Image: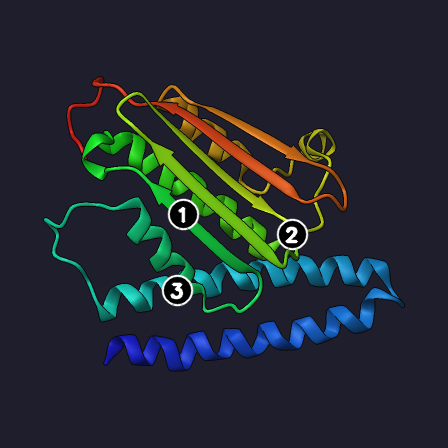
Amino acid sequence: MLAREVHDRIGSGLALALRRLDMLETTAAGSDPEAAARLQQVRAAVVDVLCATRQVTSALRDSPPAVAPFSIEDALRGFVQAMEISEPRVDLRVDGVDGLLPAAVGDAVFLAVREAMRNAVAHARARHVAVHITWDARELHASVADDGDGFDPAAVGERGSTNGLLGMRERIQAVGGVTTVTSAPRRGTRITLWVPVNERNSRHV
């Protein structure tokens, strides 16, 4: 009941607002670049709230038992499903056994990858996002690549707006890992993560 109310009253309204913003962006793009940029910022905010709303709806409909093991793949696929956005197309591939992954590493990687995916949807205007995560008993590698607008990472850092990149770096650094961002205007963006998998965290997923 509650999930249906959230979906019908909030999710549907946000989806409608997003479609109208898309039309306004198309109209403003050729006539008023400043207005188009402001509309894109509003669109990004609406997408963020829409994604969060759909995640809540999904959780209310099918809440897993509290003792269920955490799976990065299941969590990310749930995020993609909750977004209910036809574009960009998201291809997700996960190769690894969850039992080998310390919980702190799993949590950090999930949050970082989810943020990268959210940015690709909200900011990049991408048509395709490819996500690949693989790990063994020694190390984890992850990449999130899109074919969107791209940006100059140095210029974005100077403006103080990193679209969550700083948060990603801090999360991955906290578990001994490294984050690399490769992007350029009109060349898309690739975010790669490397994290050592070791025994410093005794709690596993």
Q: Distance between the residues labelled 2 and 1?
A: 21 Å
| Residue 52 image point, x, y percent | 41, 60
Neighbours of disc 1 within 10 Å: few (<14), some (14-19), many (20+): few
Q: Residue at x 59, y 38 (%)?
A: 190
Residue name at image x 33 percent, y 31 percent = 135
Check disc 2 and report its element: helix, strand or loop.
loop
Task: Specify the amino acid type for callout 1.
Answer: Arg
Helix, strand or loop at label 1? It is: strand
Residue on which disc 3 sits: 81
Residue at (40, 39) in percent of width and height: 133
Crowding around mark 3 (Cα neighbors within 10 Å: few <14, some 14 to 19, many 20+) is: some
Gap between marks 1 and 3, in whole Å?
15 Å
Instruction: Answer whether labels 2 and 3 touch (C-beta < 8 Å).
Output: no
The three-letter code of the residue at mark 2 reads Ala
Pointer 2 or 3: first along the chain? 3
Q: How far apart are marks 2 and 3 (CA)?
A: 19 Å
State the residue position of label 1: 93
Which numbered disc covers residue 124?
2
Query: According to the image, what is the colour scheme of the structure?
Result: rainbow
Q: Choose the circle earlier in sequence order: 1 or 3.
A: 3
Image quarter (top left, top right, bottom left or bottom right) of the N terminus: bottom left
Specify the quadrant of the image occupied by residue 8.
bottom left
**Category of crowding for the residue at label 2, using alpha-carbon neighbours closer than 10 angstroms: few (below 14), some (14–19), many (at least 20):** many
Which element carries disc 3, helix, strand or loop? helix
